[in-house]
Amino acid sequence: MKVLVTGGLGYIGSHTCVELSKKYSVVIADNLINSKIEVLERLNSIAHSRVIFEKIDLRNKKEVAFLFEKHGDITGIIHFAALKAVGESVEKPLLYYENNINSLLNILEQVQQLNSEINFIFSSSCTVYGEPLNLPITEEEPIKKAYSPYGETKQICENIISSSSKLNMNLKSISLRYFNPIGAHESAAIGELPLGKPQNLIPYITQTVAGLREELTIFGNDYNTPDGTCIRDYIHVTDLANAHIKAFEYLIEKEFSTNEVFNIGTGKGTSVMEIIKSFQDCTGKKVNYKIGKRREGDVDATFAENNKALDTLSWSPKYSLEQALKSAWNWEKNYRKLNNE
Ligand code: NAD
Ligand code: UDP
């Protein structure tokens, strides 16, 4: 079975391709707007079967039509491709709406023309919940006004997929609402590779320890949490990758068209201070940090109620926080060719 992975050279996509390649033949479509071509070679060095790469800009209808003409025999699509920087989306909302929504529309237009069943998985985010009313967050948590154009694109895309699934009997779909993916493949051949200054906590920590950044700024320690720093649900990227495989297999088994959503998190909340402490404990490396101002749009705490995924998809996270943090550091060291164990 052939699976199309959009955004497959990105962070989560590349890890998912490795897991997919154990059973499926994989075609990646990516325009490298937020990834490097070197990831393809790294990925193929650990993939179980060679993945095919098509350099395609999904905003371009003609390129997407070409992609489907060439690979019309796909049975599934995992749609990772999107721009994802919350802050940038506030500064460049049109870019985000155009990229994230048009890419999806172009794909679904092609799916509509196929006469075969398509199992479709969409990368959504816990950001669709906004400031949660209840913790842990279940899938029943009401969807509130998004904090950023990025978050809004995730809400809109979920709605587009849901409407399409109602009309297209060949389309079976799942939106996975990720919490905070971290860590890297155990081989350290692939990992999180932000272009420019990292926006996320873990790559900022590893780059600081690697000497690329002077110090980490903790964005606020006056939140309503036990130590005052924000709480998030950090999940190992390989566990997240495997959630896609389980979701895909679940869809294949489904007889009829469906559209479902699942939280993908560990169910455990960890504060920024606790992350720093765990990182120091499990790597033996000191993290230079200072306390700074709050970052706009951050909420006190988010963590998942993941029972729906556990029960329905027979998925469960396997890696501990320490294993995830260690793998992130191993990747950084390997990538920067550091030997300072
Ligand atoms: P990433 O930026 O590393 O990967 C996305 C990939 O999509 C990149 O390789 C980029 O080049 C490609 N891409 C973007 N626009 C494209 C276009 N128009 N045509 C072709 N390729 C395009 O991001 P990631 O962290 O791997 O995230 C993957 C998905 O998961 C995204 O949809 C993101 O919004 C979602 N998500 C990520 C997180 C997170 O913390 N990383 C959390 C929740 C949801
Ligand atoms: N954070 C921080 N300093 C940084 C980056 C992130 O203190 O340089 C905090 C951020 O305020 C949040 C947590 O780390 O509380 C996780 O942030 P990240 O951007 O990784 O993920 P988010 O939860 O925003 O998707």
Image (cartoon, rainbow, N blue to C red):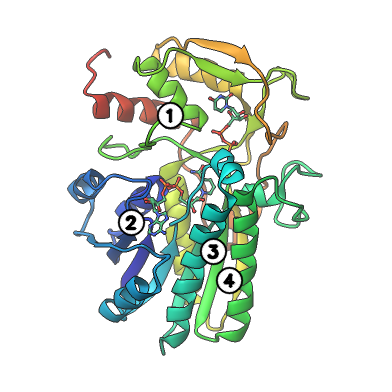
Q: Position of residue 178 (x, y in %)?
A: 56, 49
Q: Residue furthest bottom?
A: 115
> In the image, is the residue at mark 2 within 8 Å of ligand 1 by its beta carbon?
yes
> Is 292 drawn above or below residue 65 in the view shown?
above
> Is 161 drawn above or below residue 208 in the view shown?
below
Marks 1 and 2, how far apart in space? 20 Å
Q: Which residue is mark 3?
A: 101
Marks 2 and 3, how far apart in space? 16 Å
Marks 4 and 3, how far apart in space? 11 Å
Could you tell me which secondary element the residue under label 4 belongs to? Answer: helix
Marks 1 and 4, how far apart in space? 33 Å
Marks 1 and 3, how far apart in space? 26 Å
Give yes or no for contact between labels 1 and 4 (Cβ–Cβ under 8 Å). no
Which mark lies nearer to you, 4 or 3?
A: 3
The amino acid at mark 1 is Lys
Q: Position of residue 246 (x, y in %)?
A: 46, 61
> Is 65 drawn above or below residue 102 in the view shown?
below
Q: Residue at x 44, y 9 (%)?
A: 286
Q: Quadrant of the N terminus?
A: bottom left
Q: Residues within 10 Å of mark 3 (few under 14, many from 20)?
A: some
Does label 1 or label 2 sit earlier along the sequence? 2
Q: Which residue is mark 4?
A: 161
Quarter where residue 27 is shown? bottom left
Does label 2 or label 4 sit earlier along the sequence? 2
Q: Which residue is mark 2?
A: 31
Does label 2 or label 3 sit earlier along the sequence? 2
The amino acid at mark 3 is Ile
Could you tell me which secondary element the residue under label 2 belongs to? Answer: loop
